[in-house]
Image (tube, rainbow, N blue to C red):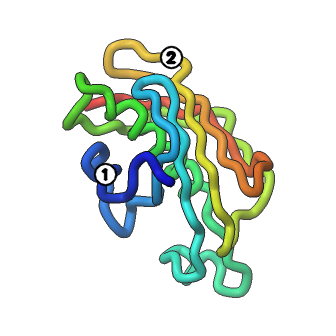
Amino acid sequence: MPLLNKEQIMEIIPHRAPFLLIDEITELEPGVRAVGKTYIKQDDFWFKGHFPEYPVTPGVLLIEMLAQVGAVCTLAMPENKGKIAFFAGIDKAKFRRNVVAGDELTLEVEIIKAKANVGVGKATGYVEGKRAFSAEITFALK
């Protein structure tokens, strides 16, 4: 059972279809850690062009999924209500496997630094319990 569904996620972050890329939040400790889920479907918009003969989820969208979970984690704090989290940096990104239709992603973000309106999250995506991709994401709040 999700802690937050899509409608509840949209109350925290400003993303909307087709760019709201997370389906639910299953764990949340505001400002500290969040875990979310995304269910990759055959009809997801990116598969039409990436790549029609071998459809895989683009790495930049995988990083965006992690960032959206991180945004929920940070923007769920009362003092950040109504703010927007922008990318300020992406470091140490690694992709270990292709993510395809039918995959269920578990997205974990732990805030490892936070100072004023800037923070860093250690972010990892899993498929079937195995690390599929990871990055260190830096964000700025406006």
Q: Which residue is mark 2?
A: 113
126 or 115: which is nearer to us?
126
- Residue 110 lies in quadrant: top right
> In the rendered view, would you say 25 is above or below 46?
above
12 or 63: which is nearer to us?
12
If the image is split into quadrants, where does the C terminus sit? top left
What separation in Å lies between label 1 and label 2 (alpha carbons)?
Answer: 26 Å
Q: Residue at x 39, y 62 (%)?
A: 19
Q: Residue at x 32, y 34 (%)?
A: 75
In the rendered image, residue 85, in percent from the top left (x then y), is placed at 34, 37
In this view, the mark in front (1 or 2): 1
Q: Residue at x 55, y 41 (%)?
A: 35
> In the rendered view, would you say 43 is above or below 85?
below
Q: Residue furthest top?
A: 115
- Residue 117 lies in quadrant: top left
Q: Is residue 93 left or right of residue 97?
A: left
Badge 2 amino acid? Lys
Badge 1 amino acid? Gln
Q: Earlier in the sequence, mark 1 or mark 2?
A: 1
In the rendered image, residue 111, in percent from the top left (x then y), is placed at 52, 24
In the rendered image, residue 59, in percent from the top left (x then y), is placed at 63, 56
> In the rendered view, would you say 31 is above or below 1?
above
Q: Tag 1, which secondary structure?
A: helix
Q: Are marks 1 and 2 in contact (CB under 8 Å)?
A: no
Crowding near pointer 1: few (<14 within 10 Å), some, many (20+)? few
In the rendered image, residue 44, in percent from the top left (x then y), is placed at 52, 76
Q: Tag 2, which secondary structure?
A: strand
Q: Residue at x 25, y 48 (%)?
A: 11
> In the rendered view, would you say 21 is above or below 8?
below
97 or 105: which is nearer to us?
105
Q: Which residue is mark 1?
A: 8
